[in-house]
Image (spheres, helix red, strand yellow):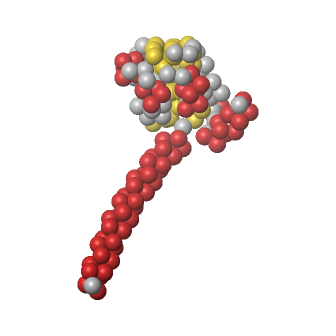
Amino acid sequence: MAARVLRRAIQQQVCLHKVLSSNIRVCRTNVRMISTANRLLSDKLFSDKHEWVTINENVGTVGISDYAQDKLGEVVYAQLPEDGTELEKDDEIGVLESVKAASEIYTPISGTVVSSNKAVEEDPTLVNKSCYDKGWLFKLELSDTGELDGLMNEDAYNDFLKTIE
């Protein structure tokens, strides 16, 4: 009888160990996902028109914010600028259409378009699924880095959102 009780206790410990190990793996995965999301946001600058930009050397990658994609709804069509197009800050450069409405896209900085996201033109829902990663809209070579000073960091943008909600 004691052997049976001991065997059962060992089996329960093994089961508990498996559950704890599994939960630790899930927690580590969640921490990595949160860390990646924070990193993706931390280097972004935002406009008051809800576009974001990240800078890598002298090239800016532009997209729309999570707030903007949420307000827009499911995006079904994207018209993006052509490569080589010269843009001035706040130029209207394209359109995102959703099941709810159409919304113009503006450039938060001046420059020359070096690449539009063809994946978004083929699958506009990428804007909804991954607006800060795969759902970027276009890249441009900056012509005036001083314009970056007029954009908001993440904290300032979040404060700005509180004033419009």
Q: In the rendered view, would you say 124 is above or below 145?
A: above
Would residue 119 appear left or right of 44 to someone viewing this image? left
Across and down, in percent, residue 61 comes to: 47, 29
Across and down, in percent, residue 105 comes to: 55, 18
Would residue 47 appear left or right of 28 to someone viewing this image? right
Q: In the rendered view, would you say 146 is above or below 24?
A: above
In the depicted view, which residue is nearer to us: 11 or 146?
Answer: 11
Q: Say which quadrant the C terminus sits in.
A: top right
Q: Say which quadrant the N terminus sits in.
A: bottom left
Across and down, in percent, residue 67 comes to: 59, 31
Q: Residue at x 60, y 40 (%)?
A: 154
Q: Note whether residue 71 is visible.
A: yes
Q: Residue at x 72, y 29 (%)?
A: 164
Q: Residue at x 65, y 31 (%)?
A: 150
User: Which residue, as the protein is rendered here, is positioned at the far front?
Assistant: 1
- How many marks the image carries: the answer is 0
Residue 23, by quadrant, is bottom left
User: Which residue, as the protein is rendered here, is positioned at the far right?
Assistant: 163
Q: Note whether residue 61 is visible.
A: no
